Image (spheres, rainbow, N blue to C red):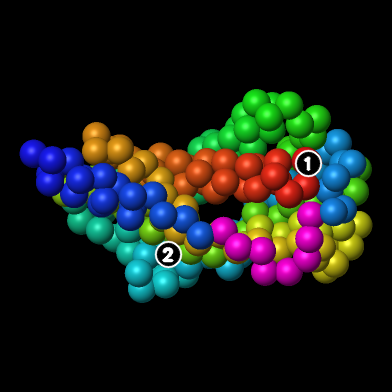
Amino acid sequence: MKKVVFALFFVTSLMTAQDMDVVKGDFSFLKDQKEVNVVFDYSNLKLMKDNLTNDQYVANRVKDLEEKGKGTGETWEKKWYASRDLTFEPKFLELMSTVLTKEKKDVVFKEDLTQAKYTLIVDAVWIYPGYNVGVMKQGAKVSMVLKFVETSNKSNVLLEIKSEKAPGDITFVGSYDNEFRIGEGYAKTAKTLAYMLVKKAYK
């Protein structure tokens, strides 16, 4: 029995692995900021192990669903794009706010703060949705490049952080909804980033 428990713990540990590393820059410019603008970017997105473009992924998924039921592919496509506004981005912003509030840091990360001096660009570069087919399940994985730039000059990157394979929905119960699992990957990324900022920018 102990071996089984250990094995489950080991597998879970592997599934929750996430790498987040500073590629360039430092955190000093954020120290006295009270608000940071947030922009979500999907222009560099690749999906699945085959690194499909978003258009390729959507076309394949729609085709598969349409073969199972007419109209289901079109319905899913609408849901896929709506999930950005309804699930992915809110999950990210919610976890950023939750951690910073919990740690008593007086700073807000929100969209449309166009007067903020700095902007965080959340660039989704790779997503694996995972799956749940009853006895077989695997969580989502989300990789991002997180860039802090000047709001008035977005080509000036002050800090760039690479986040790889943030896990989404790794419980043994799991979710049957791909978009929910991906949203959990966004949440995990935000949580890890927020704690990094607490430690390095808002001491």
Q: Is residue 16 left or right of residue 125?
A: left
Badge number at residue 88: none
Helix, strand or loop at disc 2?
strand
Percent across and percent down for residue 126 are 48, 63
- Magenta-drawn stretch contains 25: yes
Q: Is residue 162 left or right of residue 126?
A: right
Residue type beneath disc 1: Tyr
Please tell me which residue is depicted at 39% across the width and 49% down the height of the picture.
Answer: 16
Spatial CA span between label 2 and label 1: 34 Å
Residue type beneath disc 2: Leu
Percent across and percent down for residue 13 are 33, 50
Badge number at residue 202: 1
Residue linked to disc 2? 47
Magenta span covers which residues?
20-27
Q: Nearer the viewer, mark 2 or mark 1?
A: 1
Kindly report the secondary structure that dominates the magenta region of the rendered protein: strand
Specify the quadrant that holds the C terminus: top right
Percent across and percent down for residue 43 are 61, 64
Percent across and percent down for residue 141 are 41, 55
